[in-house]
Image (cartoon, helix red, strand yellow):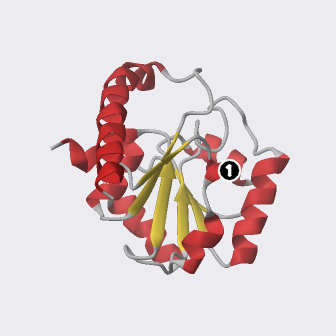
Amino acid sequence: MLKRFFPSEYVDSIHEIDYDKLFKNGYRGIMFDVDNTLVPYDMEHPNDEIIDLFIKLKEIGFQVALVSNNNEVRITKFNEKLGVYAIHKALKPMTRNLKKAMQELKTNKKNTVLVGDQIFTDIYGGNRLKLKTILVVPISDKEEWITKIKRSTEKRIINAYLKKVKKDEAKN
C-alpha cells in the first residue's frame, strides 16, 4: 500500500539529479514543482542557479515545464525569467494537468520525469501515471500550514522507502 507513495529516486536537491543520465536513458521531459523544490515558497523569482539549470536542461535536449498547485500570479511571476510551459493550480495529485503538461511538451509517460518535494501531491500524482518520480528534500522549513501538517506522515513514508531501498541493495 505504501509503495504508491514511494519515489523512483530520492535526492537532497535538484542539483544532485544526473540529468545527462536521464537523457541517455531516454527521458525527454521534466516537470518541476516550484515551491520548496526549486526555491523556497516565498521566493518570487528564480535565482541565477535555477536559470542556469533550466538553460542547461534545454541544451541537453529536455522539454521542461513547471507544474504547481500554487496560484496564477505566483507561477506566472516565477516563470517570467524561465519562459517554460507552466501550469498553476495543477491540483496534484490529480493527473489531468500532468497529462496536459506532457501533451504540451510532446512527451509521454515513458519519457517524462516529475520532480517535487511532496509525497502526497508530486510523487503520488506522478506515480498514478507511472512516471519516473524524483523526490527532493524540501529547500526550506518555511511552508504553508497545510504542508507542515503532512510532513510528519511523509517522514514515516520516507523511512519506509529508505528501508526498502536498503533491503533491495542488500539483495544485490
Type of residue at label 1?
His
Above or below, 30 relative to 119 = below
Res. 63 image quadrant: bottom right
Side (left or right) of 63 relative to 93: right
Q: Is residue 23 visible?
A: yes
Q: For the view shown, which residue lies furthest in the left direction?
A: 1
Residue 163 x %, y %: 31, 38
- Give the residue pinned by disc 1: 15
Query: In the rendered image, which quarter contains the C terminus?
Result: bottom left
Residue 12 x %, y %: 58, 40
Residue at horizontal 45 percent and vertical 18 percent from the top: 145
Side (left or right) of 83 relative to 164: right
Query: In the rendered image, which quarter contains the N terminus?
Result: top left
Residue at horizontal 80 percent and vertical 49 percent from the top: 49
Above or below, 97 relative to 144 = below
Q: For the view shown, which residue lies furthest in the right direction?
A: 48
Res. 59 image quadrant: bottom right
Residue at horizontal 36 percent and vertical 52 percent from the top: 169
Residue 15 x %, y %: 68, 50
Side (left or right) of 55 relative to 164: right
Side (left or right) of 141 relative to 3: right
Front in this rendered view, residue 22 or 150: 22
- SS of the residue under disc 1: helix
Dot 1 crowding, Cα within 10 Å, few <14, some 14–19, many 20+: few
Above or below, 83 relative to 48 = below
Count of numbered circles in the view: 1
Above or below, 133 relative to 2 = below
Residue at horizontal 41 percent and vertical 63 percent from the top: 132
Residue 88 x %, y %: 52, 50
Q: Is residue 92 visible?
A: no
